[in-house]
Image (cartoon, rainbow, N blue to C red):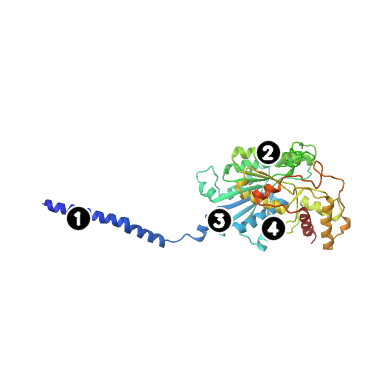
Amino acid sequence: MISRNSCASFLLFGNVASILLLVHVAFVLPKSISSLALHAPAPTAAAAACQRQRMVSIVTGASGFVGREVVHALRRDAATSSSGAPDCKDEVLCLVRGRRVDEETRYWDSVSRRDAHDCAIRVMPYEMCDGGQTLANALEYAYGGSSSSSDSDDAATSSTKCCVYHVASVFGPTDDHRQTALDNVRGTEEVVKTMSKYAPNIKLVLTSSMAAVRATNQPPKNGRWYTPDDWNTMSQLGTNWGSSYQWSKTQSERRAWELCQQYNVPLTVLCPSFVFGPPSDGVMSNSYSLSLVGQWIRGESEVQSRLCVDVRDAALAHVRAGTSDAANGKRYILSSEARLSSLDVGKALAEIVENSGIGDASRIRCDTLFDGGAIKIGEREVEASELLEKDLGVVCRPTEETMRDMAKTMLL
């Protein structure tokens, strides 16, 4: 039998023990845990570096004059922004016609051997009007098979940031220019609808055109020069291939704005004027721009005065638009602000021909009859520079520089 005094002693001892235990938990145990934390293995370098999102850029029409330059610009951008961690290495998916896949793969393999960048390039087949299937294949690859509508999408979509640069469209005379124009519009619609599966964890940068801003001889809305608020209201489908093309660019852009709003896909639109300039790697293509300047240099056609933008500046603007949230929902004219006269363009080309010793500069002749149309040559034609520099950090180089560099690449 336990006495009353024994019980009191037991209770007192128990209370003291409890207090000591609480003191140990409060002061000693945290120090032990802290010590364990200090000696725990540190995260691997790759894991630490991969705190940034992996960037996958998808470029349609990647084998074209503008599309290929956009890929080059994306590689250069990845070299300056990538962490170097294999698990979050940026990647560019070049979407080209099925028959061009092998050729384009060899091209980028060659470029990578000469100029290694911390950005993977993968060439995949793309058809503009296939119901979105080839683009869907590329998106599934980009997101590792997940979409924002699935239950298991969180890891894939949160670790991957994707931007689609829709550059592809058909430009030039075709057997049925009306159907070609309709296909251009349908292609854009399919791009947005296919991307909608991943919205809003994806972005679209659409390559529109000055053709969507104004038609030939269409006066600007403000009576002075064209701004991003101007739209082509005059070009008609079926009149001729030029008019059909201008109509297709206008209608494609309008549908992109409508569908992106409907499906909650972030959109930035770039409206380049005529694109000239040297390819980054000096490799010639069957681009209309290169063909046209070749004719001018050889004296096969008259040098023309064109409102234009350098392909290098156009490509940089695409990359900046794709990586800037501030550009979402905006439309940019991508161009020099005034035309250079055909005589000045001809002079820049002749200078390179003479210095190279290749060709005959005296054969270069210029169209001096065209005065510029609705806005005369030399006058401000578009409002572009301030917004491009403020939002995208892009300053378009002078047309003379573009023409000289283009001629050097073609002749030397």
Query: Three-letter amino acid code at disc 3?
Result: Cys
- The label on residue 253 is none
Q: Counting residues from the N terminus, which is met first, the one under dot 4 or under dot 3? A: 3
Dot 4 amino acid type: Tyr
Q: Residues within 10 Å of mark 1 (few under 14, many from 20)?
A: few
What x and y, as percent, mark residue 365? 87, 52
Residue picked out by circle 3:
88
Q: Which residue type carries mark 2?
A: Arg
Type of amino acid at the residue the image marks with label 1: Phe
Distance, label 4 to label 1, CA atoms, is 84 Å
Residue extending farthest to the right is: 362
Q: CA distance from mark 4 to mark 2?
A: 35 Å
Foreground mark, 2 or 3?
A: 2
Q: Nearer the viewer, mark 4 or mark 3?
A: 3
Q: Quadrant of residue 87?
A: bottom right
Check disc 2: other Cα within 10 Å, few if <14, some if 14-19, many if 20+: some
In the image, which is nearer the foreground, mark 4 or mark 2?
2
Q: Is residue 411 above or below residue 199?
A: below
Look at 78% across and 59% down and name the residue there.
Answer: 408
Q: Secondary structure at mark 1?
A: helix
Pick the quarter of the image with the C terminus. bottom right
Residue assigned mark 2: 254
Q: Position of residue 32 (x, y in %)?
A: 35, 60
Is residue 131 visible to us here?
no
Cα gap from disc 3 to disc 1, whole angstroms: 60 Å
Alpha-carbon neighbours of circle 4 within 10 Å: few (<14), some, or many (≥20)?
A: few
Residue pointed to by mark 4: 107
Going from the N terminus, do you reach mark 4 or mark 2 first? 4
